[in-house]
Image (cartoon, helix red, strand yellow):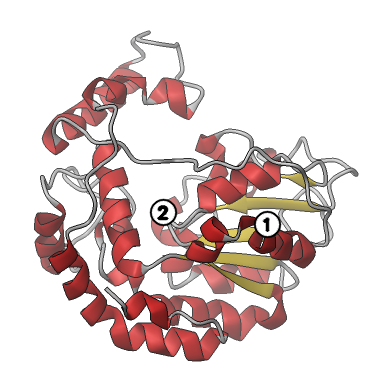
C-alpha cells in the first residue's frame, strides 16, 4: 500500500501474551503511530469472523488519521488476527510488505489467563476454568457470538486457540522474514533484549520506557455477576441513558459498571493438575512450533 496513513505493521497476537504491553511501549515511541485508546487498539478489520462488516475501510482509515511524517511505522494490535484462519491472507493482500509481530505464551497459562480476562470483562458465565474447558466441546460447533457467548468465537475456545503451530505457519508461509515471533517468557524475563529485537525488526530507535505489566486480570465476586453487569452496560448504552458518560467514548468509561464486581487481588494460579493435562494435549503442537520457528518452546512441556 502506498498510503502512508494505513498500517505497515501488525501485532497479530496471541491474546493474553503481552500484546497490550507491547502496544503501550510502541505507541510511546515517537517514531511509531498506534491507536491511543484500547477500544481502537484492536479494530480487527482483517478478521471477518470478529469484524463481521462492522468496520469498513473508511472507518478503519480514520483510526490512523493523526499519523504524520514523524512516524516511520504505523500499526495496530488485533489478537483475532492470529486465530482467525483468514486474517493472514487478508493482511497480505492489503500489504504484502507488512511486518508481523507475534508473541506466544505457554499455551496452558495463556488459556487460563484468557478465561480470567473473559470473566473479568463479563463475557464468560462459566464459574470455573474447568467448566469452561468442558463447555468448549459444544461451543466449537456453536454459532458465536450469541446471547450467552457475545465475544469473539475463538476466545471461547480456550484450549484450541492455544494450538499455535498452524496459526503461526499461515504467517510464516506468507510473510517469511517479515515475521517476528517473540516468546512471552523472554519478553518478561529479558525485556531489553526482546524489545530491542522488536525495534530493530521495525527499523526504529528504542525508547525509554516505564516497564510494567498491562491488562492484568483481577478476581471477581462472581462470573455470572460480571456477565449481568456487561449486559446492563450494553443496554444502558443502547437506550442512551447517561450513566457515567454520554457516549461511553473510552473503554474505561464504557466498562466502568464492571468495576463493581471486581476484587483487588489477582485470580488464583492455574491448578497444577489442570496445567499438566493441558500441556499433554499441546505437546505435539509445541514440538512442531519449535521446528517451524527455530525457537526453543520445549520448556513449556515441563510442568
Residue 202 x/y as whole percent: 77, 62
Mark 1 surroundings within 10 Å by alpha-carbon count, few (fewer than 14), some (14 through 19), many (20 or more): some
Q: Picture quarter containing residue 276? A: bottom left
Q: Residue at x 32, y 52 (%)?
A: 113
The answer to whether residue 44 shows anywhere in this view is: no
Quadrant housing the C terminus = bottom left
| Labels 1, 2: front one | 1
Vertical placement of residue 82 versus 41, above or below: below
Vertical placement of residue 107 versus 296, above or below: above
Residue 150 x/y as whole percent: 26, 45
Residue 92 x/y as whole percent: 65, 72
Q: Which mark is residue 192?
A: 1
Quadrant housing the N terminus = bottom right
Considering the numbered disc 1 on the image, is that residue within a helix, a strand or a loop?
A: helix
Vertical placement of residue 271 versus 230, above or below: below
Q: Residue at x 24, y 51 (%)?
A: 269
Front-most of residues 239 and 164: 164
Q: Residue at x 29, y 38 (%)?
A: 266
- For label 2, the residue is 16
Q: Picture quarter containing residue 285? A: bottom left
Q: Pointers 1 and 2 in contact (CB under 8 A)?
A: no
Amino acid at each position: 500500500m502506498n498510503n502512508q496513513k494505513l498500517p505497515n505493521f501488525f501485532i497479530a497476537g496471541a491474546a493474553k501474551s503481552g500484546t497490550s504491553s507491547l502496544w503501550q511501549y510502541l505507541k510511546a515511541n515517537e517514531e511509531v503511530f498506534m491507536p491511543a485508546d484500547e477500544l481502537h487498539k484492536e479494530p480487527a478489520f482483517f478478521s471477518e469472523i470478529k469484524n463481521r462488516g462492522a468496520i469498513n475501510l473508511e472507518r478503519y482509515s480514520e483510526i490512523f488519521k493523526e499519523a504524520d511524517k514523524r512516524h516511520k511505522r504505523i500499526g495496530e494490535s488485533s489478537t483475532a488476527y492470529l486465530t482467525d484462519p483468514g486474517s493472514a491472507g487478508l493482511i497480505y493482500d492489503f500489504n504484502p510488505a507488512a511486518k508481523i509481530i507475534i508473541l506466544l505464551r505457554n499455551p496452558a497459562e495463556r488459556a487460563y489467563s484468557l478465561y480470567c480476562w473473559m470473566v473479568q470483562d463479563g463475557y464468560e458465565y462459566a464459574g470455573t476454568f474447568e467448566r469452561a474447558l468442558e463447555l468448549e466441546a459444544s461451543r466449537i460447533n456453536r454459532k458465536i457470538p450469541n446471547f450467552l457467548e457475545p465475544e469473539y468465537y475463538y476466545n471461547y475456545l480456550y484450549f484450541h486457540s492455544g494450538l499455535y503451530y498452524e496459526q503461526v505457519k499461515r504467517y510464516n508461509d506468507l510473510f517469511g522474514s517479515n515475521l517476528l515471533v517473540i516468546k512471552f517468557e523472554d519478553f518478561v524475563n529479558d525485556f531489553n533484549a526482546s524489545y530491542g529485537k522488536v525495534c530493530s525488526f521495525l527499523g526504529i530507535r528504542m525508547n525509554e520506557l516505564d516497564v510494567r505489566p498491562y491488562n492484568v486480570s483481577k478476581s471477581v465476586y462472581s462470573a455470572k455477576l460480571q456477565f449481568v453487569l456487561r449486559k446492563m452496560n450494553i443496554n444502558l448504552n443502547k437506550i442512551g441513558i447517561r450513566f457515567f458518560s454520554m457516549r461511553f467514548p473510552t473503554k474505561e468509561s464504557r466498562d466502568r459498571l464492571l468495576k463493581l464486581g471486581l476484587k483487588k487481588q489477582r485470580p488464583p494460579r492455574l491448578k497444577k493438575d489442570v496445567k499438566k493435562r493441558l500441556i499433554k494435549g499441546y505437546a505435539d503442537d509445541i514440538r512442531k512450533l519449535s521446528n517451524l520457528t527455530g525457537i526453543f518452546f520445549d520448556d513449556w512441556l515441563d510442568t
